[in-house]
Image (cartoon, helix red, strand yellow):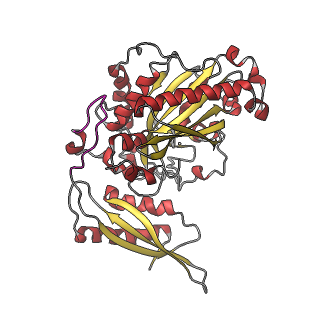
Amino acid sequence: MRVSSICVALFAASASAWSPSVTRTSTARAFSQRQLRASVADAQVDYAVPERYISDHPDCNVPPHIADLVGRGLHTRPNHPIGIIRAKIQEYFSTLPEEYKIFDAEDPIVTTKQCFDDLRIDPDHPGRSPSDTYYINDATLLRTHTSAHQSQHLRDGYECFLCAGDVYRRDEIDSSHYPAFHQLEGVKLFDQEEVNGASHLRGEEWVNSPECEAIAADLKNVLEGLMDHLFGETEKKWSEDYFPFTEPSFELEIMYEGEWLEVLGCGVIHEEVLDMSGRSERRGWAFGLGLERLAMILFKIPDIRLFWSEDERFHSQFKEGEITTFEPYSKYPPVFKDIAFWLPESYQENDFFELARGVAGDLVEKIECIDEFTNPKTGRSSKCYRISYRSMDRSLTNEEIDRLQDDLRDQSAKLDLEVR
């Protein structure tokens, strides 16, 4: 299977002056998988407890099927595609002159301050909505990105670090979206002497300074080296982007098997983020990437649900430290069912997707809107969705899917949806 057939939908949205090139050490520092795995063993014991994430608080919207995913530690399993990609990224950073602290077993429960306020994410940003985010109560949630830990690590005095973990967001349903996935975040601060005292500059004056440009150049150089490490030498292009926690911000694309693919987002850390972290006198860069995105490309895995499979036919294909092409072991036919309903004014599409996941779990392969209608007399709007049900390890029957579809119709009333 060509990578383009996997990645068109997957990447439709998103991701130095001191030396002309980063000097690599001739051999990587010792890279102990035993040490890297040790922290997650404790994390699985602590975090793989669904009861931690479900409460009777009125703001809690974490359903059981999401709580059951927390703490599985896919990113630290040495023979899992997610763990293999993560290890290769850390392997690359171990060759750089700086020593990067590894964080891989942090509590997935964070505060709204950590996840949003510390990163300059506006109070009315849609990412804060319960239709996008899994809240445990009004002050805590399942992290939506690994950047939620950035400010705390900066406060604790760390200057170069990588942070990897599972993150959670309500999202659409198709082969490239899943409500639980994995990210890796990287941060590097520069010594004050390296920015020539320019840390007092603010806003446009800082962004346009030679020191800021030098930090951005170092960032790009490091990340281009990472892409070559993962994909082999390949053509790259940069474009400007926007993130509230970095300025300037960039997006990196690479040419891979004839396609331009967005692979990550990054930028120079915003001075206000550093202020809130107690590091006003410092400057640096940060980047973040999705591990599933890279793994789906490199291993040619066509469906994101496969990463969470316990089927040995999936896991037996992968080996620590090796990139191998995934060989599909089965392809069962889908079962299609349509559902149409009148919408309330408060309708949020992600809420319906979450409801469908709660009813049918990973049997829901895709949901797409196939028709929309507004009654010209009443002004009421209606949508019709086509649901593709497909199991990755067995054939489904119309009878069992009819039962699930009937259950979904009944439960739609919870969202004030009037089934047509």
> Is residue 20 in sight in this rendering?
yes
Q: Which residue is drawn at 70% across and 30% down?
A: 271
Q: Is residue 105 above or below residue 386?
A: above
Q: In this view, does 293 lie above or below 130?
A: above
Residue 347 position within the rendered picture, expressed as x and y whole percent measured from the top left: 54, 67
**Magenta portion: prevailing SS class:** loop
Q: Which residue is drawn at 45% across and 47% down?
A: 259
Magenta segment, which residues?
Answer: 317-329
Q: In which quarter of the image is the C terminus?
A: bottom left
Q: Decide whether residue 139 is among the magenta residues.
A: no
Residue 253 position within the rendered picture, expressed as x and y whole percent measured from the top left: 52, 41
Q: Residue 377 appears in which quarter of the rendering?
A: bottom right
Q: Nearer the viewer, residue 193 or 21?
A: 21
215 sits left or right of 76 in the view? right
Q: In this view, does 337 lie above or below 254?
A: below
Q: Decide whether residue 321 is among the magenta residues.
A: yes
Residue 140 position within the rendered picture, expressed as x and y whole percent measured from the top left: 54, 42
